[in-house]
Amino acid sequence: MLRSPSLVAAVVVVTVLAGVPAQAHPARPGIGLDRAERHQKIDGFGYSIAFQRTTLIHNLSEQNREQVLDLLLDRRTGAAPSILRLGIGSSSTDPYDWMLSIQPTDPGGPDATPNYQWDGWDGGQVWYVKEARKRGIDRFYADAWSAPGYMKDNGTDTNGGALCGLQGVTCASGDWREAYARYLVQYARFYRQEGIRLDEIGFTNEPDWTTSYASMRFTPAQAAEFMKVLGPIARRAGVGVACCDSFGWQQSEAYAQAIEADPEARRHLKVFTGHGYASPAEHPLPTTAPTWMSEWAASSVQDGWNEAWDSGKGTDGIRLAERIHDSLALADASAFLFWLGGSRGATAALVQVDDANDTYRVSSRLYAFAAYSRFIRPGAVRIGVDSGVAGLKVSAYRNADGSEVVQIINTGEQTVTTEVDLKRPTGYVTDATHNLERVPGVVAGKGRHSTVTLAPRSLTTLVSERPGRH
Protein backbone atom coordinates (compact mmCIF):
# COMPACT_ATOMS: atom_id res chain seq x y z
CA MET A 1 0.00 0.00 0.00
CA LEU A 2 2.93 2.34 0.55
CA ARG A 3 4.69 4.34 -2.04
CA SER A 4 8.37 3.45 -1.97
CA PRO A 5 10.48 6.10 -0.20
CA SER A 6 13.13 5.56 -2.84
CA LEU A 7 10.91 6.97 -5.58
CA VAL A 8 12.09 10.37 -6.76
CA ALA A 9 9.75 13.13 -7.86
CA ALA A 10 10.28 12.41 -11.54
CA VAL A 11 8.27 9.26 -12.09
CA VAL A 12 5.81 7.81 -14.56
CA VAL A 13 2.67 6.17 -13.19
CA VAL A 14 0.44 3.69 -15.02
CA THR A 15 -2.72 2.25 -13.48
CA VAL A 16 -4.54 -0.54 -15.30
CA LEU A 17 -8.02 -2.02 -14.97
CA ALA A 18 -8.04 -5.23 -16.99
CA GLY A 19 -10.85 -7.18 -18.55
CA VAL A 20 -10.86 -10.16 -20.90
CA PRO A 21 -7.70 -12.18 -21.69
CA ALA A 22 -5.25 -10.62 -24.10
CA GLN A 23 -4.27 -12.35 -27.32
CA ALA A 24 -1.36 -14.72 -27.09
CA HIS A 25 0.89 -12.40 -29.11
CA PRO A 26 -0.31 -8.80 -28.65
CA ALA A 27 0.93 -5.97 -30.81
CA ARG A 28 4.06 -4.21 -29.60
CA PRO A 29 3.25 -2.41 -27.45
CA GLY A 30 -0.25 -3.57 -26.41
CA ILE A 31 -0.64 -0.25 -24.59
CA GLY A 32 0.99 2.69 -26.36
CA LEU A 33 1.19 6.29 -25.22
CA ASP A 34 0.57 9.18 -27.59
CA ARG A 35 2.59 11.84 -25.81
CA ALA A 36 1.70 14.49 -28.39
CA GLU A 37 -2.02 14.10 -27.71
CA ARG A 38 -3.00 16.34 -24.82
CA HIS A 39 -6.34 16.43 -23.07
CA GLN A 40 -7.43 18.17 -19.85
CA LYS A 41 -5.20 19.52 -17.13
CA ILE A 42 -5.64 17.72 -13.81
CA ASP A 43 -6.43 19.90 -10.79
CA GLY A 44 -6.39 17.01 -8.32
CA PHE A 45 -8.35 14.56 -6.22
CA GLY A 46 -10.19 15.04 -2.97
CA TYR A 47 -13.22 14.44 -0.78
CA SER A 48 -15.73 16.32 1.36
CA ILE A 49 -15.24 17.12 5.05
CA ALA A 50 -18.76 18.56 5.55
CA PHE A 51 -21.46 17.52 8.02
CA GLN A 52 -19.10 17.70 11.02
CA ARG A 53 -17.55 14.34 10.13
CA THR A 54 -14.10 15.69 11.00
CA THR A 55 -15.33 16.06 14.60
CA LEU A 56 -15.56 12.26 14.77
CA ILE A 57 -11.86 12.04 13.95
CA HIS A 58 -10.96 14.79 16.42
CA ASN A 59 -12.75 12.86 19.19
CA LEU A 60 -10.53 9.80 18.83
CA SER A 61 -7.62 9.14 21.18
CA GLU A 62 -4.41 10.89 20.15
CA GLN A 63 -2.85 7.71 18.74
CA ASN A 64 -5.89 6.72 16.68
CA ARG A 65 -6.52 10.29 15.61
CA GLU A 66 -3.01 10.55 14.14
CA GLN A 67 -3.40 7.20 12.41
CA VAL A 68 -6.67 8.24 10.78
CA LEU A 69 -5.24 11.61 9.76
CA ASP A 70 -2.33 9.83 8.09
CA LEU A 71 -4.71 7.46 6.31
CA LEU A 72 -6.85 10.28 5.00
CA LEU A 73 -4.20 12.93 4.33
CA ASP A 74 -0.67 11.57 4.03
CA ARG A 75 0.99 12.03 0.64
CA ARG A 76 2.98 8.76 0.64
CA THR A 77 1.04 6.33 2.82
CA GLY A 78 -2.54 7.62 2.78
CA ALA A 79 -5.27 8.84 0.47
CA ALA A 80 -3.07 11.78 -0.64
CA PRO A 81 -5.85 14.26 -1.52
CA SER A 82 -4.90 17.54 -3.14
CA ILE A 83 -8.34 19.19 -2.74
CA LEU A 84 -10.75 19.28 0.21
CA ARG A 85 -14.41 20.25 -0.15
CA LEU A 86 -15.90 22.10 2.82
CA GLY A 87 -19.55 22.67 3.71
CA ILE A 88 -20.76 26.21 4.37
CA GLY A 89 -23.12 25.76 7.32
CA SER A 90 -26.72 26.74 7.58
CA SER A 91 -28.30 24.46 10.20
CA SER A 92 -27.36 22.66 13.40
CA THR A 93 -30.28 20.33 14.13
CA ASP A 94 -27.94 17.34 14.59
CA PRO A 95 -24.53 17.81 16.28
CA TYR A 96 -22.94 15.52 13.68
CA ASP A 97 -24.95 16.53 10.64
CA TRP A 98 -24.09 20.15 9.94
CA MET A 99 -22.26 23.29 10.97
CA LEU A 100 -23.50 26.48 12.53
CA SER A 101 -24.31 29.29 10.17
CA ILE A 102 -22.13 32.39 10.36
CA GLN A 103 -25.38 34.39 10.52
CA PRO A 104 -28.03 32.17 12.12
CA THR A 105 -30.58 34.94 12.67
CA ASP A 106 -32.12 37.48 10.34
CA PRO A 107 -30.23 40.78 10.77
CA GLY A 108 -33.46 42.64 9.96
CA GLY A 109 -33.61 42.42 6.20
CA PRO A 110 -31.27 42.20 3.20
CA ASP A 111 -30.03 45.79 3.62
CA ALA A 112 -29.52 45.64 7.39
CA THR A 113 -26.07 45.56 8.97
CA PRO A 114 -24.96 41.90 9.07
CA ASN A 115 -24.61 40.18 12.45
CA TYR A 116 -22.01 37.58 11.45
CA GLN A 117 -20.61 35.14 14.03
CA TRP A 118 -17.45 33.02 13.94
CA ASP A 119 -16.21 30.39 16.37
CA GLY A 120 -12.92 29.46 14.66
CA TRP A 121 -13.97 25.81 14.64
CA ASP A 122 -16.66 25.55 11.95
CA GLY A 123 -17.78 22.06 12.80
CA GLY A 124 -14.19 20.79 12.96
CA GLN A 125 -13.35 21.91 9.45
CA VAL A 126 -10.87 24.61 10.48
CA TRP A 127 -8.92 22.10 12.56
CA TYR A 128 -8.92 19.51 9.79
CA VAL A 129 -7.83 21.99 7.12
CA LYS A 130 -4.91 23.03 9.29
CA GLU A 131 -3.93 19.37 9.67
CA ALA A 132 -4.18 19.01 5.89
CA ARG A 133 -1.94 22.00 5.32
CA LYS A 134 0.72 20.46 7.56
CA ARG A 135 0.76 17.58 5.08
CA GLY A 136 1.07 19.79 2.00
CA ILE A 137 -2.58 20.10 0.92
CA ASP A 138 -3.37 23.64 -0.17
CA ARG A 139 -6.54 23.77 -2.29
CA PHE A 140 -9.88 24.20 -0.55
CA TYR A 141 -13.35 24.49 -2.08
CA ALA A 142 -16.27 25.52 0.14
CA ASP A 143 -19.83 24.86 -0.96
CA ALA A 144 -23.21 25.93 0.48
CA TRP A 145 -26.09 23.46 0.54
CA SER A 146 -28.51 26.30 1.23
CA ALA A 147 -28.77 29.95 2.13
CA PRO A 148 -30.11 30.66 5.65
CA GLY A 149 -33.85 30.05 5.76
CA TYR A 150 -34.77 33.70 6.23
CA MET A 151 -33.25 34.43 2.80
CA LYS A 152 -35.52 31.91 1.05
CA ASP A 153 -39.13 31.81 -0.07
CA ASN A 154 -39.94 28.77 2.10
CA GLY A 155 -38.45 30.28 5.27
CA THR A 156 -36.20 27.31 6.10
CA ASP A 157 -32.83 26.03 4.99
CA THR A 158 -34.32 22.55 4.38
CA ASN A 159 -36.76 21.13 1.82
CA GLY A 160 -35.62 23.09 -1.20
CA GLY A 161 -37.05 26.53 -1.64
CA ALA A 162 -35.45 29.35 -3.62
CA LEU A 163 -33.40 32.45 -2.89
CA CYS A 164 -35.54 35.56 -2.57
CA GLY A 165 -35.01 38.02 -5.41
CA LEU A 166 -34.14 35.55 -8.15
CA GLN A 167 -36.20 35.76 -11.32
CA GLY A 168 -39.62 34.34 -10.51
CA VAL A 169 -39.05 34.41 -6.72
CA THR A 170 -40.74 37.25 -4.82
CA CYS A 171 -40.65 37.46 -1.02
CA ALA A 172 -42.15 39.93 1.41
CA SER A 173 -38.74 40.22 3.09
CA GLY A 174 -37.14 41.61 -0.07
CA ASP A 175 -34.31 40.73 -2.44
CA TRP A 176 -31.61 38.69 -0.66
CA ARG A 177 -29.32 38.01 -3.62
CA GLU A 178 -26.54 40.45 -2.72
CA ALA A 179 -26.85 39.69 0.98
CA TYR A 180 -26.36 35.98 0.23
CA ALA A 181 -23.35 36.77 -1.96
CA ARG A 182 -21.82 38.85 0.85
CA TYR A 183 -22.59 36.03 3.30
CA LEU A 184 -20.61 33.54 1.19
CA VAL A 185 -17.66 35.87 0.77
CA GLN A 186 -17.62 36.64 4.50
CA TYR A 187 -17.26 32.91 5.12
CA ALA A 188 -14.09 32.97 3.00
CA ARG A 189 -12.87 36.02 4.92
CA PHE A 190 -13.30 34.19 8.24
CA TYR A 191 -11.09 31.40 6.91
CA ARG A 192 -8.51 33.93 5.81
CA GLN A 193 -8.62 35.24 9.36
CA GLU A 194 -7.51 31.71 10.39
CA GLY A 195 -4.64 31.88 7.90
CA ILE A 196 -6.44 29.68 5.35
CA ARG A 197 -7.19 30.66 1.77
CA LEU A 198 -10.35 29.25 0.20
CA ASP A 199 -9.69 28.95 -3.52
CA GLU A 200 -13.30 28.50 -4.64
CA ILE A 201 -16.74 28.98 -3.14
CA GLY A 202 -19.97 27.48 -4.46
CA PHE A 203 -23.41 28.89 -3.83
CA THR A 204 -25.42 25.75 -4.50
CA ASN A 205 -25.34 22.00 -3.98
CA GLU A 206 -27.63 19.84 -6.13
CA PRO A 207 -29.89 22.76 -7.12
CA ASP A 208 -32.16 20.35 -9.01
CA TRP A 209 -32.84 18.07 -6.00
CA THR A 210 -34.97 18.73 -2.91
CA THR A 211 -34.10 17.02 0.37
CA SER A 212 -35.30 17.06 3.97
CA TYR A 213 -31.92 18.42 5.05
CA ALA A 214 -30.24 21.62 3.84
CA SER A 215 -31.15 22.19 0.19
CA MET A 216 -32.08 25.03 -2.16
CA ARG A 217 -33.32 25.13 -5.75
CA PHE A 218 -31.87 27.03 -8.70
CA THR A 219 -32.97 26.67 -12.30
CA PRO A 220 -30.14 26.88 -14.86
CA ALA A 221 -31.24 30.44 -15.72
CA GLN A 222 -31.29 31.42 -12.04
CA ALA A 223 -27.81 29.94 -11.51
CA ALA A 224 -26.46 32.07 -14.37
CA GLU A 225 -28.30 35.08 -12.92
CA PHE A 226 -26.73 34.62 -9.48
CA MET A 227 -23.28 34.10 -10.98
CA LYS A 228 -23.46 37.73 -12.09
CA VAL A 229 -24.32 38.85 -8.54
CA LEU A 230 -21.75 36.77 -6.68
CA GLY A 231 -18.96 36.97 -9.24
CA PRO A 232 -17.91 40.63 -8.83
CA ILE A 233 -18.16 40.44 -5.01
CA ALA A 234 -16.09 37.27 -4.88
CA ARG A 235 -13.53 38.62 -7.33
CA ARG A 236 -12.93 41.70 -5.19
CA ALA A 237 -12.33 39.37 -2.25
CA GLY A 238 -9.90 37.23 -4.25
CA VAL A 239 -12.06 34.10 -4.29
CA GLY A 240 -13.03 32.02 -7.32
CA VAL A 241 -16.61 30.90 -7.98
CA ALA A 242 -17.64 27.31 -8.69
CA CYS A 243 -21.01 26.13 -10.01
CA CYS A 244 -23.33 24.19 -10.13
CA ASP A 245 -23.05 20.74 -8.45
CA SER A 246 -26.11 19.25 -10.16
CA PHE A 247 -27.05 15.82 -8.80
CA GLY A 248 -26.23 14.15 -12.14
CA TRP A 249 -23.60 14.63 -14.84
CA GLN A 250 -26.10 14.66 -17.69
CA GLN A 251 -28.34 17.00 -15.70
CA SER A 252 -25.36 19.35 -15.38
CA GLU A 253 -25.49 20.07 -19.11
CA ALA A 254 -28.37 22.55 -18.79
CA TYR A 255 -26.47 24.55 -16.15
CA ALA A 256 -23.30 24.57 -18.22
CA GLN A 257 -25.21 25.73 -21.30
CA ALA A 258 -26.96 28.51 -19.40
CA ILE A 259 -23.69 29.91 -18.07
CA GLU A 260 -21.85 29.53 -21.39
CA ALA A 261 -24.69 31.40 -23.13
CA ASP A 262 -24.24 34.39 -20.83
CA PRO A 263 -20.78 35.98 -21.33
CA GLU A 264 -20.96 37.94 -18.08
CA ALA A 265 -21.87 34.86 -16.03
CA ARG A 266 -19.17 32.81 -17.77
CA ARG A 267 -16.56 35.48 -17.04
CA HIS A 268 -17.05 34.89 -13.31
CA LEU A 269 -16.97 31.07 -13.43
CA LYS A 270 -13.67 29.52 -12.37
CA VAL A 271 -14.67 25.84 -12.14
CA PHE A 272 -17.77 23.98 -13.31
CA THR A 273 -18.84 21.22 -10.94
CA GLY A 274 -21.21 18.27 -11.24
CA HIS A 275 -22.18 15.13 -9.31
CA GLY A 276 -22.51 11.54 -10.45
CA TYR A 277 -25.69 10.27 -8.78
CA ALA A 278 -28.57 10.69 -11.25
CA SER A 279 -26.21 9.94 -14.14
CA PRO A 280 -22.50 9.04 -14.30
CA ALA A 281 -19.72 11.12 -15.82
CA GLU A 282 -19.22 9.49 -19.21
CA HIS A 283 -18.94 12.43 -21.60
CA PRO A 284 -17.51 15.98 -21.57
CA LEU A 285 -19.82 18.81 -20.51
CA PRO A 286 -20.56 21.78 -22.82
CA THR A 287 -18.34 24.32 -21.09
CA THR A 288 -14.92 25.83 -21.67
CA ALA A 289 -14.28 25.93 -17.91
CA PRO A 290 -12.41 23.13 -16.12
CA THR A 291 -14.95 20.56 -14.94
CA TRP A 292 -14.85 18.69 -11.65
CA MET A 293 -16.67 15.55 -10.63
CA SER A 294 -17.30 17.17 -7.27
CA GLU A 295 -19.25 14.43 -5.49
CA TRP A 296 -20.01 10.75 -5.83
CA ALA A 297 -20.30 7.71 -3.60
CA ALA A 298 -22.31 4.55 -4.02
CA SER A 299 -25.26 4.21 -1.64
CA SER A 300 -24.48 2.38 1.57
CA VAL A 301 -28.17 1.88 2.44
CA GLN A 302 -28.22 -1.63 0.94
CA ASP A 303 -24.53 -2.46 1.30
CA GLY A 304 -23.86 -1.31 4.85
CA TRP A 305 -20.21 -0.85 5.77
CA ASN A 306 -18.31 -2.62 3.00
CA GLU A 307 -14.53 -2.98 2.97
CA ALA A 308 -14.39 -5.38 0.01
CA TRP A 309 -12.51 -4.77 -3.20
CA ASP A 310 -14.81 -6.87 -5.38
CA SER A 311 -17.92 -8.39 -3.82
CA GLY A 312 -20.40 -7.35 -6.49
CA LYS A 313 -21.64 -4.36 -4.48
CA GLY A 314 -21.74 -0.75 -5.61
CA THR A 315 -19.53 0.28 -2.70
CA ASP A 316 -16.66 -2.02 -3.75
CA GLY A 317 -13.21 -0.55 -4.27
CA ILE A 318 -13.06 -1.59 -7.92
CA ARG A 319 -16.30 0.27 -8.59
CA LEU A 320 -14.75 3.49 -7.29
CA ALA A 321 -11.67 2.90 -9.45
CA GLU A 322 -13.90 2.60 -12.52
CA ARG A 323 -15.80 5.77 -11.60
CA ILE A 324 -12.56 7.71 -11.31
CA HIS A 325 -11.32 6.33 -14.64
CA ASP A 326 -14.56 7.18 -16.45
CA SER A 327 -14.69 10.70 -14.99
CA LEU A 328 -11.15 11.44 -16.16
CA ALA A 329 -10.90 9.47 -19.40
CA LEU A 330 -14.46 9.73 -20.72
CA ALA A 331 -15.79 12.97 -19.23
CA ASP A 332 -12.53 15.00 -19.31
CA ALA A 333 -12.95 15.91 -15.64
CA SER A 334 -10.03 17.86 -14.20
CA ALA A 335 -10.72 16.65 -10.65
CA PHE A 336 -12.49 13.82 -8.88
CA LEU A 337 -13.92 14.51 -5.42
CA PHE A 338 -15.31 11.57 -3.47
CA TRP A 339 -18.12 12.16 -1.00
CA LEU A 340 -16.77 11.69 2.54
CA GLY A 341 -13.26 10.90 3.71
CA GLY A 342 -14.32 9.66 7.15
CA SER A 343 -17.76 8.96 8.58
CA ARG A 344 -19.62 6.69 10.96
CA GLY A 345 -21.86 3.61 10.86
CA ALA A 346 -23.08 2.14 7.57
CA THR A 347 -21.11 4.58 5.45
CA ALA A 348 -19.49 4.48 2.03
CA ALA A 349 -16.67 6.77 3.20
CA LEU A 350 -13.02 5.89 2.79
CA VAL A 351 -12.65 5.30 6.54
CA GLN A 352 -15.28 4.36 9.12
CA VAL A 353 -14.82 6.18 12.43
CA ASP A 354 -16.44 5.13 15.72
CA ASP A 355 -15.44 7.85 18.16
CA ALA A 356 -17.63 6.41 20.93
CA ASN A 357 -15.50 3.25 21.02
CA ASP A 358 -12.27 4.88 19.82
CA THR A 359 -11.96 2.62 16.77
CA TYR A 360 -11.75 2.94 13.00
CA ARG A 361 -11.80 0.70 9.93
CA VAL A 362 -10.37 1.19 6.43
CA SER A 363 -12.11 0.29 3.17
CA SER A 364 -10.56 -0.78 -0.12
CA ARG A 365 -12.05 2.41 -1.56
CA LEU A 366 -9.23 4.33 0.08
CA TYR A 367 -6.62 2.40 -1.91
CA ALA A 368 -8.57 2.72 -5.17
CA PHE A 369 -8.64 6.48 -4.59
CA ALA A 370 -4.98 6.64 -3.55
CA ALA A 371 -3.80 4.76 -6.64
CA TYR A 372 -4.78 7.83 -8.63
CA SER A 373 -4.22 10.63 -6.13
CA ARG A 374 -0.74 9.66 -4.94
CA PHE A 375 0.77 9.61 -8.39
CA ILE A 376 -1.28 11.94 -10.65
CA ARG A 377 -0.47 15.28 -9.14
CA PRO A 378 -2.01 18.74 -9.66
CA GLY A 379 -0.80 20.21 -12.93
CA ALA A 380 -0.63 16.86 -14.72
CA VAL A 381 -2.10 16.58 -18.22
CA ARG A 382 -3.95 13.55 -19.53
CA ILE A 383 -2.22 12.24 -22.65
CA GLY A 384 -3.30 9.88 -25.40
CA VAL A 385 -3.50 6.11 -25.05
CA ASP A 386 -3.54 3.55 -27.87
CA SER A 387 -4.62 0.21 -26.45
CA GLY A 388 -5.45 -2.78 -28.61
CA VAL A 389 -6.07 -5.03 -25.62
CA ALA A 390 -9.75 -5.84 -25.18
CA GLY A 391 -11.28 -5.34 -21.77
CA LEU A 392 -8.78 -2.90 -20.33
CA LYS A 393 -9.67 0.57 -19.13
CA VAL A 394 -6.52 2.62 -19.57
CA SER A 395 -5.65 6.28 -19.07
CA ALA A 396 -2.29 8.06 -19.07
CA TYR A 397 -0.96 11.30 -17.60
CA ARG A 398 2.15 13.44 -17.66
CA ASN A 399 2.97 15.31 -14.47
CA ALA A 400 4.31 18.85 -14.48
CA ASP A 401 7.80 17.53 -13.63
CA GLY A 402 7.83 15.42 -16.81
CA SER A 403 6.97 12.12 -15.18
CA GLU A 404 4.17 10.08 -16.70
CA VAL A 405 1.23 8.21 -15.20
CA VAL A 406 -0.85 5.45 -16.79
CA GLN A 407 -3.81 3.88 -15.01
CA ILE A 408 -5.18 0.45 -16.09
CA ILE A 409 -8.23 -1.49 -14.75
CA ASN A 410 -8.81 -5.22 -15.47
CA THR A 411 -12.53 -5.89 -15.14
CA GLY A 412 -12.24 -9.48 -16.38
CA GLU A 413 -11.88 -12.80 -14.62
CA GLN A 414 -8.57 -13.87 -16.22
CA THR A 415 -4.98 -12.66 -16.08
CA VAL A 416 -3.88 -10.39 -18.93
CA THR A 417 -0.29 -10.08 -20.09
CA THR A 418 0.61 -7.28 -22.48
CA GLU A 419 3.28 -4.72 -23.28
CA VAL A 420 3.28 -1.10 -22.19
CA ASP A 421 5.14 1.83 -23.70
CA LEU A 422 7.04 2.58 -20.50
CA LYS A 423 10.64 2.04 -19.54
CA ARG A 424 11.42 0.05 -16.37
CA PRO A 425 8.21 0.88 -14.45
CA THR A 426 7.48 -0.20 -10.91
CA GLY A 427 4.18 -2.04 -10.50
CA TYR A 428 1.63 -1.43 -7.76
CA VAL A 429 -1.40 -3.68 -7.46
CA THR A 430 -4.74 -3.02 -5.81
CA ASP A 431 -7.11 -5.97 -5.68
CA ALA A 432 -8.72 -8.38 -3.21
CA THR A 433 -5.35 -9.25 -1.65
CA HIS A 434 -3.20 -6.14 -2.26
CA ASN A 435 -3.68 -2.56 -1.04
CA LEU A 436 -1.70 -0.48 -3.54
CA GLU A 437 1.36 -2.68 -2.98
CA ARG A 438 4.52 -3.25 -4.97
CA VAL A 439 4.27 -6.79 -6.28
CA PRO A 440 7.34 -8.59 -7.71
CA GLY A 441 6.89 -10.04 -11.17
CA VAL A 442 4.12 -7.70 -12.28
CA VAL A 443 6.52 -5.90 -14.62
CA ALA A 444 9.33 -7.38 -16.70
CA GLY A 445 11.64 -6.13 -19.47
CA LYS A 446 14.56 -3.76 -19.71
CA GLY A 447 14.02 -2.08 -23.05
CA ARG A 448 11.81 0.78 -24.17
CA HIS A 449 8.71 -1.34 -23.61
CA SER A 450 7.82 -3.39 -20.57
CA THR A 451 5.68 -6.48 -20.17
CA VAL A 452 3.02 -6.19 -17.51
CA THR A 453 0.92 -8.96 -15.98
CA LEU A 454 -2.49 -7.80 -14.85
CA ALA A 455 -4.30 -9.87 -12.25
CA PRO A 456 -8.02 -10.54 -12.71
CA ARG A 457 -10.31 -7.83 -11.35
CA SER A 458 -7.43 -5.58 -10.43
CA LEU A 459 -6.12 -2.05 -10.61
CA THR A 460 -2.46 -1.97 -11.61
CA THR A 461 -0.44 1.21 -11.21
CA LEU A 462 2.85 1.39 -13.08
CA VAL A 463 5.42 3.97 -12.04
CA SER A 464 8.20 4.52 -14.55
CA GLU A 465 11.28 6.66 -14.80
CA ARG A 466 10.64 9.63 -17.02
CA PRO A 467 11.75 9.37 -20.66
CA GLY A 468 15.44 9.97 -21.17
CA ARG A 469 16.45 9.06 -17.64
CA HIS A 470 18.91 6.18 -17.23
Image (cartoon, grey):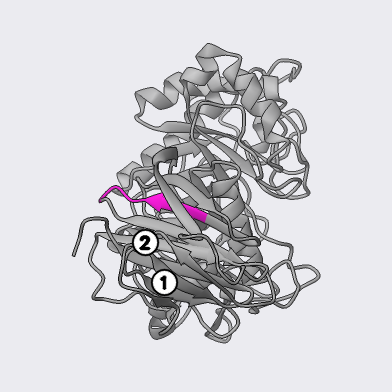
Q: Is residue 303 left or right of residue 459?
A: right
Residue 353, given in percent of the width and then of the height, sits at 56, 76
Q: Which mark identifies residue 375?
A: none
Residue shown at 27% from the left, 50% from the top: 402
**Which is nearer the N-term, disc 1 or disc 2?**
1
For the magenta stretch, what is the residue range? 395-401
Residue 108 included in the magenta stretch of the image? no
Q: Secondary structure at mark 1?
A: loop
> What residue did someone put label 1 on?
78
Q: Between residues 124 and 430, which one lies in front from this camera angle?
A: 430
Q: Between residues 33 and 217, which one lies in front from this camera angle?
A: 33
Are the two marked residues, 1 and 2, in contact with CB atoms closer than 8 angstroms?
Answer: no
Q: Secondary structure at mark 2?
A: loop
Note whether residue 353 is visible: no
Residue 349, given in percent of the width and then of the height, sits at 60, 67
Q: Residues within 10 Å of mark 2 (few under 14, many from 20)?
A: many
Place residue 164 in its image quadrant: top right
Place residue 69 in its image quadrant: bottom left
> What residue did someone put label 2 on?
422
* Outermost residue, front side: 25
